[in-house]
Image (cartoon, rainbow, N blue to C red):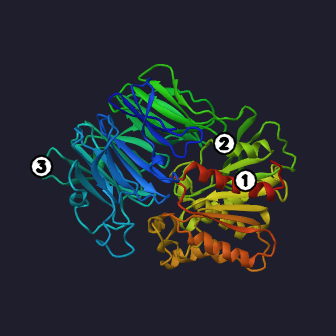
Amino acid sequence: MSPPSVHRGRYFHLRRVGDEPQPVLYVREGARSADRALLDPAALSADAATALDWWYPSPDGTLLAYGLSEGGSEKSILRVKDVATGRDRDDVIPWTRAASLAWLPDGSGFYYTRYPEPGTVPVGEENYHRRVFFHSLGADGHDDPVVFPQTEDRPPEDWPGVSLSPDGRWLAVSVSRGWTRTDVYLRDRAAPGSGFVTVVEGEEALVGVFVRNDRLYLHTNLGAPRFRLLVADPHEPGRAAWRELIPEAPDVLEGVSVVGDVIVASWLKDASSRVTLHDREGRRRRAVALPEIGSVAGITGEWDGDEAFVGFSSYTSPPAVYRIPLPGGDVEEWARTEAGVDTGRYRTRLVRYLSRDGTPVSMFLVDREDRPADGTGPAVLTGYGGFGVSLTPAFGRSLMLFLEAGGLWAVAHLRGGGEYGEDWHRAGMLGRKQNAFDDFLAAGEWLGREGHAASGRLAIVGGSNGGLLVGAALTQRPGLFRAAVAQVPLLDMLRYHEFRIARLWIPEYGDPGDPEAFRWLHAYSPYHHVESGVAYPAVLITTGESDSRVDPMHARKMAARLQAATSSGRPVLLRVEPRAGHGQGKPLAKVIEEWTDVWTFLFAELAMEP
């Protein structure tokens, strides 16, 4: 369930209920009216593998631009729907993976990002050269003009996004280079023939930008590793004219939304969310009460509205959406999903332990309130540790099966993540990546030492960059774990950049073609550290045939190498899902089948009874 995107009395939001294969996009004609299904992607294919990748309502809520992809590929095709009738217009634009889109105020067209048409760039470059175009409704998308860049000498890995002020005057383009740098450019559309003015360029800092008619807001870690909020006059957007509204604080300023004259801020404190309300000048007015240790999943509201919406969930509470009347008023529940299980007997605790170099690391423990820490029980440890991604509490029904059977779920907040700001991220990237692995291994040792996991009953699980984490852990300390599950993982770090979109990750991992980066990548690359005759734990590696992010070759070659090398006699299994990708858009039936296999594997290896 998502918080609604509000557009002149229409409330657009995603929800998946019960056994629906995919989330459905609903619209409400008024905050308290009944939902009307606007787009059910599962109905568009026999196996429900058509996914709604992204969607953008027009400012007046009469039109919807959206992207669909097939079989988990995330290779979106843009379409435009009439919201009142539900019928699609003739506008169809391919190559719009992960599109950023900004409508004109009158809905006559939009700025958007897409990739090059096949044949217009060299073979192998199709996943790069993302550009900003403009589309007039009814025009042929093949003829859409390029709006940015103004020159073609920009690196093909640049990742631009677009936003537009509500009055349509100010067009902002944010260009990401990896997960540590954002360049921002602004164009005054009211000045004929004007080009883009540089707001910030060349700084090793992230900048999130959004424009209101009279204000340019910058949410950034420039000079503030835990982020702050700045403001500028769009007529003078340069750094010399920036003014601080919300300064850096001990907690991480994770996100900001401006609704009317109220600034709604989301903070991270020890990987748990907090929400505060501020006036137009950044002065704090009050905190918003959240139910428990949990995660804010988006803050929305109309730019000139009088209500904000907050999505929230936790390990033991299913997703809900809360409405906040502005500037004052009591928080009220707007929508909720039902758990289908009794979660009242489970608990979430925050603990701290020391990593190999003495760095304190935090970790969530989730288990039954009556589970003893007597050193006999099973535990599963997970983590991520990369790209500034924060592992915050998230609800999962399948986890309840494990908790009910006496398991403990441990989530470590490793260096490389964003739980404690950009310094925490940088401490676990590039040549410092081993810090993330050390933090993870130290978590496993601590769980055993403190009686949370029995010897031989500790497993590790991780996906994508977290799959790399699992691969590094099982090759560096194979005797510490009884079982390991690596989902859609990166595992060959000497050739990763040659496949799919992986060149985008060079700023995070390093370029194997650079001698210094080669040394640190080779030092931990899991595939290159599998040794024949070592007693490896039981391993399950999963991948999807249509994964357009991490090439399935990582999973295939690692499974083959481990099968040939291990001396433990424990299984090494490879699970390949057809018509599925990195995980996004996977229909419910495939999700259930995969997690049934994962939990069956873990229950068997950890000697658990369901």
Callout 2 environment at 10 Å: few (<14), some (14 to 19), or many (20+)? Answer: some
Image check: 33 left or right of 536? left
Task: State the residue position of label 2.
Answer: 397
The quarter of the picture where residue 343 lies is top right
Q: Amino acid at mark 2?
A: Arg
Q: Amino acid at mark 1?
A: Trp
Name the secondary structure under disc 2.
Answer: helix
Which percent across, then down, holds residue 483? 76, 61
- Please identify, in this view, whether the residue under mark 3 or under mark 2 is nearer the observer: 2
> For residue 599, which numbered disc appears in the image?
1
Residue for badge 3: 192
Measuring 49% from the left and 33% from the top, which residue is drawn there? 310
Whether residue 217 is visible here, answered yes or no, is yes
Please state which of residues 569 and 243 is positioned toward the viewer in this rendering: 569
Amino acid carrying mark 3 in the image: Pro
Which comes before the other along the chain, label 1 or label 2?
Answer: 2
Identity of the residue drawn at 71% across and 74% down = 562
10 Å crowding of disc 3: few (<14), some (14-19), many (20+): few
Residue 595, given in percent of the width and then of the height, sits at 67, 53
Which residue: 67% across, 76% down?
A: 560
The residue mark sitting in front, 1 or 3, is 1
Task: Assign a secondary structure to mark 1.
Answer: helix
Query: Disc 1 and disc 2: Cα gap in Å?
Result: 12 Å
Q: Nearer the viewer, residue 75 or 308?
A: 75
Left/right of residue 293 with respect to residue 211 in the rendered view: right
- Residue 142: x percent and y percent? 24, 60
Q: How far, Cα to Cα, is label 1 from label 3? A: 61 Å
Q: Is residue 40 above or below residue 181?
A: above
Question: Secondary structure beneath disc 3?
Answer: loop
Q: Nearer the viewer, residue 212 or 490?
A: 490
